[in-house]
């Protein structure tokens, strides 16, 4: 793993830098494998990035879009990560519907939804049981509490090592989420972090010694590239 930490002046700086990283890796992936796979994060920070990607003349038929986590709400709900990404990006580009892979939150039981998305990934990436796909790019954020995707502190989801997808738990509210091992199989992980409120968690996440059960973003140690794009207000001295 190569960890790169970059401090950009503001969110616009983060967006431009992330866009450049994504476009480079999309071009390389399509040249080598004919396709580019990206997993999206939710929350507020990535929205302007999705709006910027929508402006790019990309070969949309070669781009596969997944979600790293989802709130357990329908796509038209204001909290839906799928809904946000469609409104900011996917509804504005000619990407084939089959290339968009949202997490289905209709099953009454979230564990069924997690199983269904895992089966879908196994089918899309033609995986053997127990295998993990390597997505080209996984986008992540962090919460003030050090969570990432929907891997929240002191939850069972943090301990899942043999699955691709599991059920997250935010204050009793279910979420569907990539597991840490799936994220760590990615060729490139990009964290987008803005705001001074993220500094205390970042300090714990970057500390040489620390507790991943309390700061789950510490679990993210991908085999490939790891980029931390911070805005000035979130930046801390990196040990
Ligand atoms: C989600 C996210 C989550 C998010 C962080 C940061 O569905 O909420 O995937 O992990 O990245 O909570 O959110 P902000 O960008 O809004 O600070």
Image (tube, helix red, strand yellow):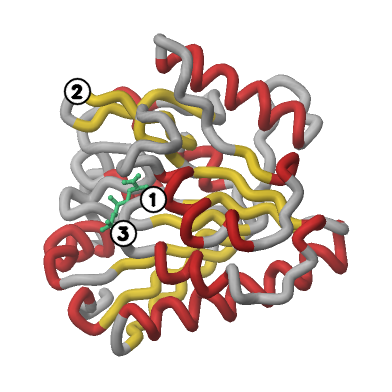
Residues at circles 3 and 1 in contact by the CB criterion of under 8 Å: no
Q: Position of residue 61 (x, y in %)?
A: 81, 56
Q: Is mark 1 within 8 Å of ligand 1?
A: yes
Q: Position of residue 224 (x, y in %)?
A: 60, 60
Q: Position of residue 127 (x, y in %)?
A: 76, 29
Q: Which residue is mark 1?
A: 42
What residue is at 63 percent from the left and 49 percent from the top?
65
In the depicted view, which residue is nearer to us: 63 or 31?
A: 63
Using the image, determine if residue 113 lies above or below residue 137.
above
Quadrant in the picture for residue 24: bottom right
In the depicted view, which residue is nearer to us: 200 or 168?
A: 168
Disc 2 residue crowd, few under 14, some 14–19, many 20+, Cα 10 Å: few
Disc 3 residue crowd, few under 14, some 14–19, many 20+, Cα 10 Å: few
Judged left or right of residue 29, residue 45 is left
Q: Which residue is mark 3?
A: 44
Using the image, determine if residue 72 lies above or below residue 182.
above
Q: How many marks?
A: 3
- Mark 3: which secondary structure? loop
What residue is at 75 percent from the left and 60 percent from the top?
60
Disc 1 residue crowd, few under 14, some 14–19, many 20+, Cα 10 Å: many
- Mark 2: which secondary structure? loop
Q: Quadrant of the N terminus?
A: bottom right
Q: Position of residue 36 (x, y in %)?
A: 74, 58
Q: Which residue is mark 2?
A: 172
Distance from label 3 to label 1 (Cα)? 7 Å
Q: For residue 196, which numbered disc appears in the image?
A: none
In the rendered image, the residue lying farthest to the bottom is: 9
Using the image, determine if residue 233 lies above or below residue 176.
below
- Mark 1: which secondary structure? loop
* First in sequence: mark 2 vs mark 3: 3
Judged left or right of residue 136, residue 6 is left
């Amino acid at each position: 793993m190569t960890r790169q930490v970059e401090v950009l002046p503001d969110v616009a700086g983060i967006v431009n830098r992330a866009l450049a990283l994504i476009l480079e890796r999309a071009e390389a992936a399509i040249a080598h494998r004919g396709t580019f796979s990206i997993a999206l994060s939710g929350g507020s920070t990535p929205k302007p990035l999705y709006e910027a990607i929508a402006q790019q003349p990309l070969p949309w038929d070669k781009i596969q879009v997944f979600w790293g986590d989802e709130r357990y709400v329908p796509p038209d709900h204001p909290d839906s990560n799928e809904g946000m990404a469609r409104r900011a990006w996917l509804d504005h580009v000619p990407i084939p519907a089959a290339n968009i892979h949202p997490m289905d939150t209709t099953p009454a039981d979230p564990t069924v939804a997690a199983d269904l998305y895992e089966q879908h990934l196994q089918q899309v990436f033609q995986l053997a049981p127990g295998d993990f796909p390597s997505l080209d790019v996984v986008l992540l954020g962090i919460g003030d509490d050090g969570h990432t995707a929907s891997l929240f502190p002191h939850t069972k989801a943090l301990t899942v090592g043999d699955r691709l997808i599991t059920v997250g738990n935010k204050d009793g509210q279910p979420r569907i989420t990539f597991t840490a091992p799936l994220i760590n199989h990615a060729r490139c992980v990009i964290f987008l972090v803005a705001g001074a409120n993220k500094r205390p968690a970042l300090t714990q996440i970057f500390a040489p010694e620390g507790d991943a059960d309390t700061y789950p973003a510490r679990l993210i140690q991908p085999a490939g590239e790891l980029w931390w794009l911070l805005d000035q207000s979130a930046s801390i001295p990196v040990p």
